[in-house]
């Protein structure tokens, strides 16, 4: 369960894993609504992660814990 | 001299790798590649890995990253090199972080404070010694604003509790005492030292308690280490633009400026590698956006001024254009003077945090071409950023070994090399013009428009120096 930072960079949602120096663009996010946010996150490098969905869209940037999906 | 094409460069990499044993060869192969501008970059090169035993690497240690780079330049604090005397003494004042102040009275940048560990300190622990040292500092240098304890290798090995000593002493003297766990053996290079130093600033200096009202144009200039005055030549441009630089560190910075970093509208981040951790943290916790910029050479400076201005209103944006226009004549004159002398010259770089990519534009402005570049301690994200700056197909080498670098240079025959002090004399003896690009070879500043003038002059002075024609001893010359 690495700790990652989600961040919006010029409108593009990015995910940053400090441990791996990985800064990748999010290509798809399962739940992207105001009242449900998270789920499966797919990155442009082909990897995918799972974030327990939240009830509100968080204020970005935010550090969260994700699992391998 | 003809440039090598992509295929030839690949063949060169193969050839250079040939001498290594199988395993080392497989490992090193991942750190060398040829990149073309705009190419898809993810994972094209492996970086931030442990250097191989047996090769000559140019890297430093975590202590160097924390004491030497991030903390060291904070001028009104005393940074104790805690452990044996050598680590601090041999690196003392080597980075040329300029500052204003009276050394030994209110500023301490070029001094070396150390607990000078002896055998008995290793055996019985050095905590007592650290206490004594802090007392002595308070007596001798009462105007210091705070103390940081920069751990050298033995501290972690013998398990001293510098945190406890720091807490007790901070309460006693009423000033911050910051323990930094940057023992040299941590991580694979100085890079982890930057991270540890960032975390120490985050945990021990930044705080909600320091929050106060923020002006609309208040910005922080961070991760500029004022080498040869770099931060000064950057800051004037920002101020001319109408921005209010309330905080500038760590180059020529003070502890109060670091504390005050939570009160800005925007963090201007020059060296991404060494302070992105803090920038990201401040964005999340204090709601301060950050922007990377590049003040090497007029083209990049112009781009950066516009990028910075885009975070503010029209007044600032208009001011940015004025600043750009104001310096136009000055830079044109420089380019007119030096470009004919430097046009078409080929450069190989091997430097640290940001320069392997940031200086490419400045060379380009002078008509020079960077044909090879690499980082001592870069990470993936650095190489990705490098791709955007490449202008032509370029050889990339990560944590290059002494042997590889020499072989590449022999084959590619650059007209100029920019690297560190460890490579300098080897290449000069090979008869190749060399600039030390870590501390600007006793010159600088190189940032901003004023810095570009000096940059251009230095490159010309080095490259076109008559000494390079005198490499053969007179009695060995054929008549
Ligand atoms: S590796 Fe350890 S002993 Fe060597 S300079 Fe760094 S802190 Fe000092």
Image (cartoon, coloured by chain):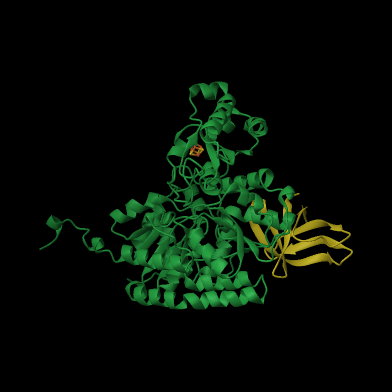
Chain colours: A yellow, B green
In this view of the protein, which residue sits in the foreground, B366 or B266?
A: B266
- Residue B44, given in percent of the width and then of the height, sits at 56, 62
Q: Is residue B329 left or right of residue B44?
A: left
- Dividing the picture into quarters, in which one does residue B415 lie? bottom left
Extreme left residue here? B479
- Dividing the picture into quarters, in which one does residue B143 lie? top right
Image height check: is B55 above or below B472? above
Q: Is residue B291 left or right of residue B351?
A: right
Tally of marks: 0
Q: Is residue B238 left or right of residue A39?
A: left
- Residue B400, given in percent of the width and then of the height, sits at 45, 53
In this view of the protein, which residue sits in the foreground, B31 or B240?
A: B240
Q: Is residue B278 left or right of residue B367?
A: right
Image height check: is B89 above or below B229? above
In this view of the protein, which residue sits in the foreground, B449 or B422?
A: B449
Q: Residue at x 73, y 55 (%)?
A: B212
Q: Residue at x 47, y 65 (%)?
A: B359
- Residue B334, given in percent of the width and then of the height, sits at 39, 73
Q: Residue at x 67, y 59 (%)?
A: B264
Q: Is residue B7 visible?
A: no
Rendered-image quadrant of the C terminus of chain A: bottom right
- Dividing the picture into quarters, in which one does residue A46 lie? bottom right
- Residue B439, given in percent of the width and then of the height, sits at 43, 54
Q: Is residue B246 visible?
A: yes
């Amino acid at each position: 369960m690495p700790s990652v930072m989600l961040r919006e960079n010029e409108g593009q949602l990015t995910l940053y894993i400090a441990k791996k120096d990985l800064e990748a663009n999010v290509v798809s996010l399962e739940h992207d609504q105001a009242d449900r946010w998270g789920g499966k996150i797919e990155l442009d490098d082909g990897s995918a992660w799972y974030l327990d969905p939240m009830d509100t869209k968080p204020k970005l940037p935010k550090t969260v814990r994700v699992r391998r999906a | 001299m003809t440039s090598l094409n992509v295929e030839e460069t690949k063949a060169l990499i193969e050839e250079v790798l040939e001498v290594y044993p199988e395993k080392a060869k497989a490992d090193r192969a991942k750190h060398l590649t040829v990149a073309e501008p705009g190419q898809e970059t993810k994972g094209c090169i492996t970086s931030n890995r442990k250097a191989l035993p047996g090769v000559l690497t140019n890297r430093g240690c975590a202590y160097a990253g924390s004491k030497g780079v991030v903390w060291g330049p904070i001028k009104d604090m005393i940074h104790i090199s805690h452990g044996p005397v050598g680590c601090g003494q041999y690196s003392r004042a080597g980075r040329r972080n300029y500052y204003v102040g009276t050394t030994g009275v209110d500023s301490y940048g070029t001094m070396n404070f150390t607990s000078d560990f002896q055998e008995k300190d290793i055996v019985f622990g050095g905590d007592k010694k650290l206490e004594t040292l802090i007392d002595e500092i308070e007596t001798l240098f009462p105007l210091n604003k705070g103390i940081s304890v920069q751990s050298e290798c033995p501290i972690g090995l013998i398990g001293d509790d510098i945190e406890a000593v720091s807490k007790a002493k901070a309460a006693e003297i009423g000033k911050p005492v910051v323990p930094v766990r940057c023992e040299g053996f941590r991580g694979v290079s100085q890079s982890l030292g930057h991270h540890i130093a960032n975390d120490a600033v985050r945990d021990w200096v930044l705080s909600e308690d320091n929050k106060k009202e923020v002006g609309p144009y208040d910005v922080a200039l961070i991760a500029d280490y004022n080498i040869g005055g770099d931060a000064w030549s950057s800051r004037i441009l920002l101020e001319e633009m109408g921005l209010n630089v309330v905080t500038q560190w760590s180059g020529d910075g003070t502890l109060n400026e670091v504390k005050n970093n939570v009160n800005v509208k925007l963090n201007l981040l020059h060296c991404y590698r060494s302070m992105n951790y803090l920038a990201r943290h401040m964005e999340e916790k204090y709601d301060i956006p950050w922007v990377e910029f590049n003040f090497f050479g007029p083209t990049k400076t112009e781009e950066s001024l516009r990028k910075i201005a885009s975070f503010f209103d029209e007044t600032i944006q208009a001011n940015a254009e004025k600043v750009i226009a104001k310096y136009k004549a000055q830079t044109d004159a420089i380019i007119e003077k030096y470009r004919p002398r430097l046009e078409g010259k080929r450069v190989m770089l091997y430097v640290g945090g940001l320069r392997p990519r940031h200086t490419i534009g400045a060379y380009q402005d002078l008509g020079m071409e960077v044909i090879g570049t690499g980082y001592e301690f870069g990470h993936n994200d650095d190489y990705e950023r490098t791709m955007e700056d490449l202008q032509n197909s370029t050889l990339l080498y990560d944590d290059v070994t002494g042997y590889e670098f020499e072989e590449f240079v022999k084959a590619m025959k650059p007209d100029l090399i920019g690297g560190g002090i460890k490579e300098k004399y080897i290449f000069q003896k090979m008869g190749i013009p060399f600039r030390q690009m870590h501390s600007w070879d006793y010159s600088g500043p190189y940032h901003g428009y004023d810095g570009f003038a000096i940059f251009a002059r230095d490159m010309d002075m080095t490259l076109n120096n008559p000494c390079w024609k005198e490499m053969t001893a007179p009695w060995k010359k054929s008549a």
